[in-house]
Image (spheres, coloured by chain):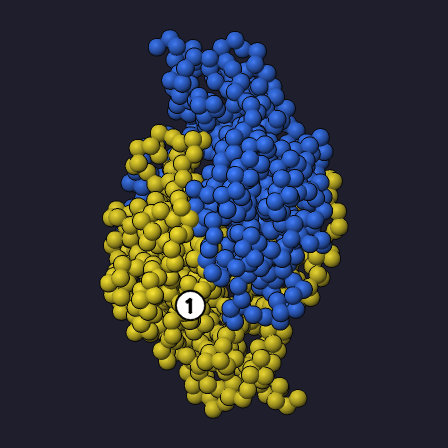
Chain colours: A blue, B yellow
Amino acid sequence: MNPDQFRQHGHELIEFIADYIEQLESYPVQAQTRPGEIRNQLGDTIPENGDPFEIIIKDFEHIIMPGITHWQSPSFFGYFPANHSGPSILGELLSAGIGVQGMLWLTSPAATELETHVLDWLVDALALPDTFQSTATGGGVIQDSASSAVLCAVLSAREQATDWQSNQTGIQQTLVAYTSEQAHSSIEKAVRIAGIGSDNLRLIAVDQQFAMNPEALQRAIDNDITQGLKPFFVCATIGTTSTTAIDPVDKIGRICERHNIWLHVDAALAGSAAICPEQRWLHQGLEYAHSYCFNPHKWLLTNFDCDCFYVKHRSSLIKTLGIHPEYLKNPASDTGEVFDYRDWQISLGRRFRSLKLWFVIRYYGLQGLRKHIRQHIELSQQFAEWVDTHPDFQRMAPVPLNLVCFRHNSDDVLNQKLLETLNNSGKCFLTHTRVNGVYTLRVCIGGTYTRETHVQQLWQLILKTVQTIQQT
Amino acid sequence: MNPDQFRQHGHELIEFIADYIEQLESYPVQAQTRPGEIRNQLGDTIPENGDPFEIIIKDFEHIIMPGITHWQSPSFFGYFPANHSGPSILGELLSAGIGVQGMLWLTSPAATELETHVLDWLVDALALPDTFQSTATGGGVIQDSASSAVLCAVLSAREQATDWQSNQTGIQQTLVAYTSEQAHSSIEKAVRIAGIGSDNLRLIAVDQQFAMNPEALQRAIDNDITQGLKPFFVCATIGTTSTTAIDPVDKIGRICERHNIWLHVDAALAGSAAICPEQRWLHQGLEYAHSYCFNPHKWLLTNFDCDCFYVKHRSSLIKTLGIHPEYLKNPASDTGEVFDYRDWQISLGRRFRSLKLWFVIRYYGLQGLRKHIRQHIELSQQFAEWVDTHPDFQRMAPVPLNLVCFRHNSDDVLNQKLLETLNNSGKCFLTHTRVNGVYTLRVCIGGTYTRETHVQQLWQLILKTVQTIQQT
């Protein structure tokens, strides 16, 4: 494809995407296809000769599009959002267009320096502890997801707890990790990957707000020490996936400090809210954290993947993940004056992801980003009020931010049926969890294009669907 | 940014990228900036109010661009390539535009099914073992990089070797891994991450072609068994980073089979060449492999990141990496009839990366892709001949594909000076390695826009630069 052909097809595709965004409401939110239905249309054999680009785009439209669940639909309320935006899409485009690989400072100094700079900016923007700044002892790096961030944290903690020996010798003693029973599955996955084992992850009980009980954490640590085991890692969550519960980071942090345990704080969704000064209470106690992450790809208008991962001491991370073969040596790295981000992550290679984040921050500014967050929080509070004031529904958890957990007063069967019917209608998409053992619907409001009218429509649809189910 | 603004800025950016591609040769290949130079221009404080998009692009042009090392330059010969192409860039654009997250089949059935389909296509296209097909016991999945692929392989091997217990209990016995002393640093990194420890990675000696010596492997395994240790994982390389050496996979495979050891084959660069029937000798013995990867993002016109990772038994991978919290349960997953790719990788979330790969394959067809590979191999052979026939230069390793390792006959100092002068000239970019302890230049020919004229220019520049150095 020569530059002129690229121009032609590029312009066509820009129009295609703009049309898509304009027409988002016309698509069924959840793909209405059965397993294998898309694949069966894809052509058994790999093509020997190329096709014109127009044909490929037509196939995308007719074959792929029906199998898309529209995460950008204003009526997508499932999981946590993965919201995109114009400047972010264009940042991804430019990153792909220049096609640089930022594994080392040398392999594109601007890719490294922009990332460092934007991550430092966000320390200010979210009022995170100054130690996370690259100009102090810490620093930030973009990971693909909070799963990778917590894995890097677990590994650094493992190394620190073993006097930097376990990379060399393997794991020689029983290390124990702690998180709440409401924490994300990625914590357990990281503990498994790192060779610690799920048996050595303690799931600490929560209080009535689903936040970790620090006394229970203290008891578990004491018990493990008595058994001759070595507590090494605690993950606290600010905004759990199930209910956006907020662990008491300050109390947990004091316990970790006392026992010299690495504290990681996972604020994957909720962290973005701290861009609004009135939401900074969320991060209370964060000065105790050795590492922290939040995902602009969830709630800050930046395309997946973009997780911002911070450490208090970058030397810990680099010592844990650094590896220096001859073929990557270069004078700039040798000086020790530059960051080589390959030493801050699992993989060697990396895309130029700070570009989209920079575009988003520059284009919207802090004011624009705050407006977006505030609107979602306000709509969620409104939705929670509708639930609270309706006699047939009950709210299942506090709503500190933009997630409402609720259920119909009847039984699990009706609530399951309700979710299934709503999603199959194509008019909205929501997901579920279990709260205190009962089936609970989750409505998370964080879409780029979600407005009051979509939330109203959702509530009306829920009421109507319950009625229909009850009548049949 | 509303759809009309997106149209406007999108069209501008398409023009910008097309212009960039047209003007690639006018940029210095290696960024000519000093540490901190880019960052110092970026503005100390995060903007309170947004900027017009035009201003952001102007800043990109004036601040960021000088700090870019141009991987897509036709005179970029460093590392291994990370080549892009028009259809691939547009695939990334469309993926960002629709912004779906493919962690589960349900969260966009087409994202999962297209990935499965395209990866099955590539089993045929590269004539890989049929067991890697998803329609058999195996299957393929896109990882960000070969580093992540080998980590998934090490973890699956670890689980298999411990009767699927180490995820649960942590590592309870000494497991031993093997790879050649020429293998990529990501193998050691994976062994560290998995809690095995570098001490338990044996770096097996190589022959005069830098390929793993299978007798030495056998001896090392025997020795470890005698010591009461448990060999569990071997990584063979097809096309090492240093010299594109090719390990004897068939002989290694027979050893692994005899001892029930997981064999992973890393063909990150070289695998793509097997799209040409005459290069399929590369994969001889691959039927012994439990897992395999190659990177279309290196040499198959597909933007980074795109590593294709295959396993012979997908059940091993899923059993190792699967984790099922309530909030991700859904009827489709419950049937067991669909793939949920979150269980095939480290992270939970994932981009729609098969789109760009599908675009590339559809647009170029097998014929177009083969032409591209053949051209690079031919140019590399030509370059090797120039080296071989010049009295002042020596070739340091065989050239089975598209990498030429060579040096000037004098000493390390001159060769280092040569590399530095070439890269600082901005006219080309190459990197180095050490072969049998001596400093060696690497020229890898795999750029999308690299033609004979660029390779000729490179050789002339090398000759001229040596002369200049010798005269001063």
Compared with residue B363, is residue B240 higher up or lower down, i.e. above or below?
below
Compared with residue B274, is residue A408 higher up or lower down, i.e. above or below?
above
Compared with residue B227, is residue B407 higher up or lower down, i.e. above or below?
below
Q: Which residue is mark 1?
A: B183
Direction from residue A338 to residue B49 in the image, left or right: right
Q: Secondary structure at mark 1?
A: loop
Direction from residue B337 to residue A448 in the image, left or right: right
User: What is the x, y in percent for residue A64?
Assistant: 38, 39
Dot 1: within a 10 Å radius of its alpha carbon, few (fewer than 14), some, or many (20 or more) residues?
many
Q: Quick check: can you spot residue A227?
A: yes
Q: What's the amino acid at mark 1?
A: Ala
Between residue B239 and residue A204, name the one nearer to us. Answer: A204
- Tell me the residue at 45%/80% (across/down): B436
Can you tell which quarter of the image residue A208 is in?
A: top right
User: What is the x, y in percent for residue A203?
Assistant: 49, 35
Direction from residue B364 to residue B441 in the image, left or right: right
User: What is the x, y in percent for residue A76?
Assistant: 50, 29
Q: Chain of mark 1?
A: B
Q: Quick check: can you spot residue B189?
A: no
Direction from residue A33 to residue A272 in the image, left or right: right
Between residue B152 and residue A315, name the one nearer to us. Answer: A315
Quadrant including the N terminus of chain A: bottom left
- Tell me the residue at 54%/89% (across/down): B410
Residue lying furthest front in this view? A226
User: What is the x, y in percent for residue B14?
Assistant: 56, 50
